[in-house]
Image (cartoon, helix red, strand yellow):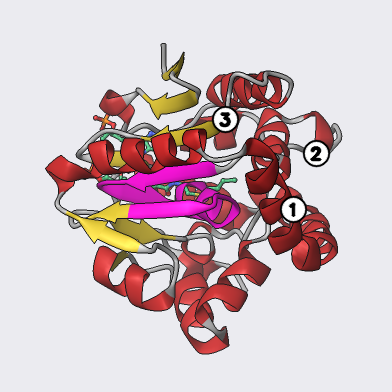
Amino acid sequence: MDILSSINDGILTLEFNRPERKNAITAEMYQLMADALNDAEGNADVRAILIVGKPEIFTAGNDLEDFMKNAPSSGAIEDRSVYKYMMALSGSTKPIVAAVSGNAVGIGTTLLMHCDLVYAADNAKFSMPFVQLGLCPEFGSSLLLTQIAGYPRAAEKLMLGEAFGAQEALEMGLVSKVLPVDELRAFAEGQAAKLVALPASSIRVTKELMKAARKATVSEAIAAENIHFGKMLSSPEAREAFMAFFQKRKPDFKQFS
Ligand SMILES: C/C=C/C(=O)SCCNC(=O)CCNC(=O)[C@H](O)C(C)(C)COP(=O)(O)OP(=O)(O)OC[C@H]1O[C@@H](n2cnc3c(N)ncnc32)[C@H](O)[C@@H]1OP(=O)(O)O
């Protein structure tokens, strides 16, 4: 299974488990995670959610082969499993803890902005290389990163797409603590266990109140981003970037005006 899903002591743990492809996320993996999150919504026994990868890799983001095969030239974005997953994540009423070690690329970083408690290992590396792929930010990152980090820093991360480390992620407020990689998972599990022991109704209301102010603007940003993202996935620039990645060469964007 490319996603390991388990419920123990009130915690739903979702673990990326495709290390041979750097935990790159396929449509099937998004669907599995969307289903688990939606099931958790109706399951009172789940009182916290934990998202983890492997010590050496969180996720390389969307599977680029999937991007090439399934560019959404037709069909509604709402029907795509990535959309279902991100809506389930951003709309979850349960507290979500994320623990990042290794690379968190693209949607791997975006998804953190929809979680509640976010922790990084000292080997974590974050990147949103949307522009480098001929794409644009997705699922609220154009708005949320600006709110979290301020415009200049968000512009640097989103326009240049370069990777940055755990310490910088801490300074900008993307994560709230950095730990040694071999301590990260146990720490995150401990934080999730604390949430489980607290009154679920208080956690629920606190989360709702904290997210209320940004709810409408995040939805608007996601809708606007999706319009561009969907079209850009089939653009010649994106094709060139995907081909270049698999051919292990630098993309040549100068051929496009
Ligand atoms: C809506 C969502 C949007 C997004 O998420 S956009 C972001 C899309 N993701 C990316 O552009 C990241 C692409 N991957 C990488 O940049 C690198 O990987 C890493 C920095 C994550 C790791 O680098 P290294 O440790 O050198 O590993 P390696 O040799 O590049 O990868 C090992 C194998 O994994 C495959 N792989 C890695 N990432 C992806 C991916 N995203 N989609 C499909 N396959 C991937 C490779 O091709 C290779 O395979 P082989 O061993 O056969 O050469």
The residue labelled by disc 2 is 77
Q: Nearer the viewer, residue 228 or 111?
A: 111
Q: In terms of image quadrants, where is residue 135?
A: bottom right
Q: Amino acid at mark 3?
A: Arg
Locate ligand 1 by image quadrant.
Answer: top left
> Horizontal and vertical percent for residue 67?
57, 37
Q: Nearer the viewer, residue 213 or 133?
A: 213
Left or right, 200 with respect to 154, comes to right
Are there few (<14), some (14-19), or many (20+) residues within 10 Å of tag 1? some
- Residue 190 is inside the magenta segment: no
Residue depicted at x 75% and y 52%: 231
Dot placed on the residue nearer the N-terminal end, 3 or 1: 3
Q: Is residue 182 visible?
A: yes
The answer to whether mark 1 and mark 2 are in CB contact below 8 A is no
Q: Which residues are magenta?
A: 96-119
The residue labelled by disc 1 is 208
> Horizontal and vertical percent for residue 200?
63, 37
Q: Amino acid at mark 2?
A: Ile
